[in-house]
Amino acid sequence: MQLTLTTCAVRSWRASDAESLTRHANNRKIWLNLRDLFPHPYGIRDARAYLQMVLGKTPETGFAIDVNGEAVGGIGVVLKPDVERVSAEIGYWLGESFWGRGIVTDALSATTRHIVAAHHLTRVYAVPFAHNIASCRVLEKAGYVLEGRLRKSAIKDGTIVDQMQYAFIVSESAEVANSLSSAISSARPPTGIQR
Ligand SMILES: CC(C)(COP(=O)(O)OP(=O)(O)OC[C@H]1O[C@@H](n2cnc3c(N)ncnc32)[C@H](O)[C@@H]1OP(=O)(O)O)[C@@H](O)C(=O)NCCC(=O)NCCS
């Protein structure tokens, strides 16, 4: 997968990304805004284990954010199962030295459209911590709409925090809905799962 954008590219991970992944991911400021599944400190073994996992996965749901040929961040989705198979949760991070250049706004807009088309989705959502103003802003710039505040719904670094739920609804995005309406209406339930 390769999406070539104005400020960056979003592409498939490569085994050779392990060192740049470690260098950019090993940052407490990044970890503080992500789920605890994302390790800290982030070492080369964590990077190799992640790459091994992501490279062996079909369909491909995790991607590198690439600037000048270097993987400087990540963006990925969790495809929801069963009756929620028209939904996916998206998450992302970027190396601190690249913050504030519009990179994740670009990456999020393009990746949202890519996964909507690839998986016949009607909805993509994200749940940043309420204090993560930059992430909330990025979501708004990429066409996501605030649905609610999930009060005291998470614990991070020993503190109970609120989360904000944002969603991108395909049918409310005229540009995306027009290009995808036929793909969405042809989505069929997988074998063995009843609605
Ligand atoms: C959040 C993050 C992904 C943003 O990426 P980025 O490429 O720097 O974002 P962009 O440059 O596209 O946009 C950032 C926006 O937030 C705004 N912003 C940043 N910090 C802000 C603050 N403290 N208060 C208000 N606005 C802020 C910027 O001004 C910009 O908005 P603008 O274009 O209207 O000026 C990046 O900082 C990051 O990886 N943080 C750590 C991990 C993380 O938070 N991941 C998301 C988990 S939900």
Image (cartoon, rainbow, N blue to C red):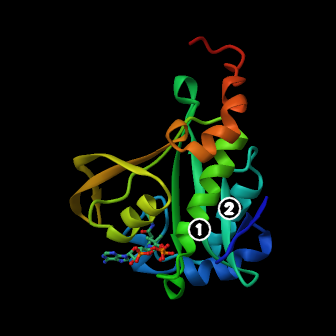
User: x, y (%) of residue 34?
Assistant: 42, 63
Point out the residue furthest to the bottom here: 97
The one nearer the camera, 108 or 52, is 108
Please state the quadrant of the image where ligand 1 appears.
Answer: bottom left
Q: Which quarter of the figure is the N terminus placed in? A: bottom right
Q: Which residue is mark 2?
A: 63
Q: Measuring 55% from the left and 40% from the top, which residue is drawn there? A: 170
Distance (Cα) linking label 2 and label 1: 14 Å
The one nearer the camera, 90 or 186, is 186
User: x, y (%) of residue 51?
Assistant: 70, 64
Q: Is residue 77 left or right of residue 29?
A: right
Residue 54 visible? The answer is yes
The residue tagged with tag 1: helix, strand or loop?
helix
Q: Measuring 72% from the left and 29% from the top, which residue is drawn there? A: 182
Q: Which residue is mark 1?
A: 106
User: x, y (%) of residue 17?
Assistant: 73, 75
